[in-house]
Amino acid sequence: MRTAYTADQIRAAEQALMARLPEGTLMQRAAAGLAAVCADLLGRVYGSRVVLLVGSGDNGGDALYAGERLARRGARVEAVLAGSRTHEAGLRALLDAGGRVAEATAIGQADLIMDGLVGIGASGALREPYARLAAEANAAGAAVVAVDLPSGVDASSGRVAGAAVRARVTVTMGAYKTGLLVDPGAAFAGDVELIDIGLGEHLPDPDATALTGRDVAGLIPRPGDESDKYRRGVLGVAAGSDLFTGAAVLAVGGALRGGSGMVRYAGREAPVAQVRSHWPEAVVTLLDAPSIEHVGRVQAWVLGPGLGTDTWAHELAVKVLASDVPVLVDADGLTLVARDKALLRRTAPVLITPHAGELSRLIGADRAGIEAARLEHARRAAAELGVTVLLKGSTTVVAEEGRPARVNVSGTPWLSTGGTGDVLSGLAGALLAQGLSCYDAASCGAYLHGVAGRLAADGAPLTAADVATAIPGAIRAVTSPGS
Ligand SMILES: NC(=O)C1=CN([C@@H]2O[C@H](COP(=O)(O)OP(=O)(O)OC[C@H]3O[C@@H](n4cnc5c(N)ncnc54)[C@H](OP(=O)(O)O)[C@@H]3O)[C@@H](O)[C@H]2O)[C@@H](O)CC1
Ligand SMILES: Nc1ncnc2c1ncn2[C@@H]1O[C@H](COP(=O)(O)OP(=O)(O)O)[C@@H](O)[C@H]1O
Ligand SMILES: [K+]
């Protein structure tokens, strides 16, 4: 599991560690790691041109000491000093090694630019001249290496309030910062290399985590000798309407590949006909009235994709949410719940799977604000509504009160096409039906959905149905990697 921390958590851990070490030790460890990554990127260090963008704090200090190491190996290292002050010992070390101070025009000549403008000590949008230097570095065409995090990205949230450095590689010290995992910040970080500076034992519980394939493999159930279709868990799907039949087909398609023993679909005439013809494996009930009385027992429900928002749909939502099993609420189900939040007052767990627009209706925040601060809003929704939240988008965030947020980074932008969310709701619902908690079902579902998206896309457009088809391959990829 990848663990990530806020700036305050990192700072506290660094202070605890620093108290036990000779002064400057951590910065030397950071600089050594940073210089090694830069040397790898350069290929040939001797004779290469390296420009350091140096801010007034220790982030600039890291860059200066790493620059010193590259200068000793024959690189031509120039430091652009941007702050009102400069890490003095670091600058002296660079100059002693043959580096020099230069004007910003050096940026255009660089093979590699090291961004040491600001790190975890930054607050708010980059000020001048930092913002201009960030823009010049982005335009230069050289490999940009961010020190600790790209300047302009908020370490704790991933917010980008103005200009920011767009790095090819970010060399982060001691531990991941949450802002490196969550968009928009994550998109600026490039590949993230973690340098161990010995923080480990001083770190508290993480602020956020990201599951790996191995974690997912350890969490998702596999059938055993004693399994039968009922023991493996039965999922109910209440989705689709006469207007939106496709959502029902896609949600059931995702569900059938998610490993539950059986999928029961319940709906109106048109989606029932479609689901029957697409999925002979599903047990289908045509609803004469908005009731789940004759559907049979299930261990979890998916409620909402394409369901519509009329009185009939509302009545059905009332019945499903009155059941005593976990319910995943998506799409139109979220619109119904946003109108009538009392529906969420139930004893069994609720997992909601909104995109930013749907979340905006649920918590009365604007969409752009949610996209700019995804973690904060997902957490707020989880606390206010008392549910588990899976906020979809370029990075998917799972939030539940009292637990670290889980961030999913397995996906691909090819997933941004109609209907992929319906597939996710079926898949995560199937994991709920198999007994996973909302927190695990959401984060494993998002992970597998992302991998399925990558397998289905393979560098070209995909359809939502392709993603559903690729789910077994995604499960295989995490449970038997390399086979
Ligand atoms: N501690 C350790 O053991 C280790 C720390 N390490 C390294 O230290 C880094 C943290 O260093 P730090 O605390 O000195 O803060 P840092 O991020 O360099 O800059 C803060 C200064 O920038 C300024 N500034 C702020 N906001 C701004 C803005 N929006 N726009 C423009 N300027 C802004 C402001 O100064 P001002 O110019 O206002 O006087 C402020 O004082 C950390 O990320 C890691 O790289 C590693 O070596 C491992 C060991
Ligand atoms: N840029 C992106 N990168 C990765 N995944 C994305 C991106 N944009 C959207 N997605 C994923 O695609 C899916 C879209 O779901 P949703 O918005 O509900 O679409 P629909 O309602 O059409 O099914 C979500 O799983 C989301 O996380
Ligand atoms: K930086």
Image: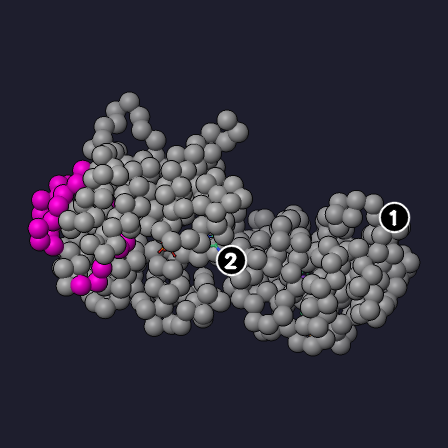
Instruction: Classify residue 214 as left or right of residue 383.
Output: right
Where is 220 relative to 90, above or below? above
User: Which is the main secondary structure of the residues drawn in magenta?
Assistant: loop
Q: Amino acid at mark 1?
A: Tyr
- Identify the residue under disc 2: 182
Instruction: Classify residue 352 as left or right of residue 272.
Output: right
Q: Tell which of 149 and 371 is nearer to you.
A: 371
Snapshot quadrant of residue 366 = bottom left
Task: Check the image and name the residue furthest to the top.
Answer: 225
**Residue found 15% across the figure and 50% down from its top:** 268
**Residue found 73% across the figure and 67% down from its top:** 136
Instruction: Classify residue 411 as left or right of residue 163.
Output: left
- Identify the residue under disc 1: 46
Total numbered badges shown on the rendered structure: 2
The magenta region covers 283-310
Sequence order check, earlier mark of 1 and 2: 1
